[in-house]
Image (spheres, rainbow, N blue to C red):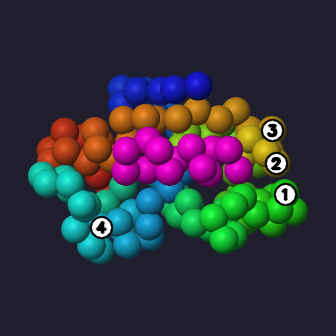
Amino acid sequence: MVIDANTLLKNIDSKKFQVIDARSQERFLGLIPEPRENMSGGHIPNSINLPFETVLKKGKMKSKQELTKILNNLNIENQPLAFTCGSGITACIILLASELVSKNKNVLYDGSWAEWGQSGKFPIEK
């Protein structure tokens, strides 16, 4: 259930799965500096943003009905999904939300932005 950066790099062209980033919209768009030194701002090409707080209510997972609505709004039905964030931890929150209400195949990119966002290492969109 874990993938690496090379798999994600190939996916930019193949688009075999949809990448979903759990970071804040400001970090995803590269509008604010990254908390780690020497990190580029932005996101993995072709990824979409779903901040992890979106699936939580008072620190707990929203209802299955609410989660279904949130995920349906992303138009990702029947697509394999890869979840990412800043370090691989908050991505697990939205991966769990998907596991609770969808039949999508879910994987985690645990290298997340800590690996991908290193200046000049991988392609980045803003």
> Could you tell which of marks 1 and 2 lies nearer the N-terminus?
1
Q: CA distance from mark 3 to mark 4?
A: 31 Å
Residue identifier under label 3: 103
> Could you tell which of marks 3 and 1 lies nearer the N-terminus?
1
Q: Residue at x 26, y 48 (%)?
A: 117
Res. 122 image quadrant: top left
Res. 74 image quadrant: bottom right
Q: Residue at x 24, y 60 (%)?
A: 35
Is 48 left or right of 56, judged from the image as shown?
Answer: left
Q: Amino acid at mark 1?
A: Lys
Residue 107 image point, x, y percent = 58, 33
Residue identifier under label 1: 64
Q: CA distance from mark 1 to mark 2?
A: 6 Å
Q: Above or below — where is 62 with respect to 110?
A: below
Mark 4 nearby-residue class (10 Å; few <14, some 14–19, many ≥20):
some
Q: Is residue 39 magenta?
A: no
Q: Amino acid at mark 4?
A: Gly
> Could you tell which of marks 4 and 1 lies nearer the N-terminus?
4
CB under 8 Å between callouts 4 and 1?
no
Q: Amino acid at mark 3?
A: Lys
Residue identifier under label 4: 30
Image quadrant occupied by the N terminus: top right
Element class at badge 4: loop
> Could you tell which of marks 3 and 4 lies nearer the N-terminus?
4
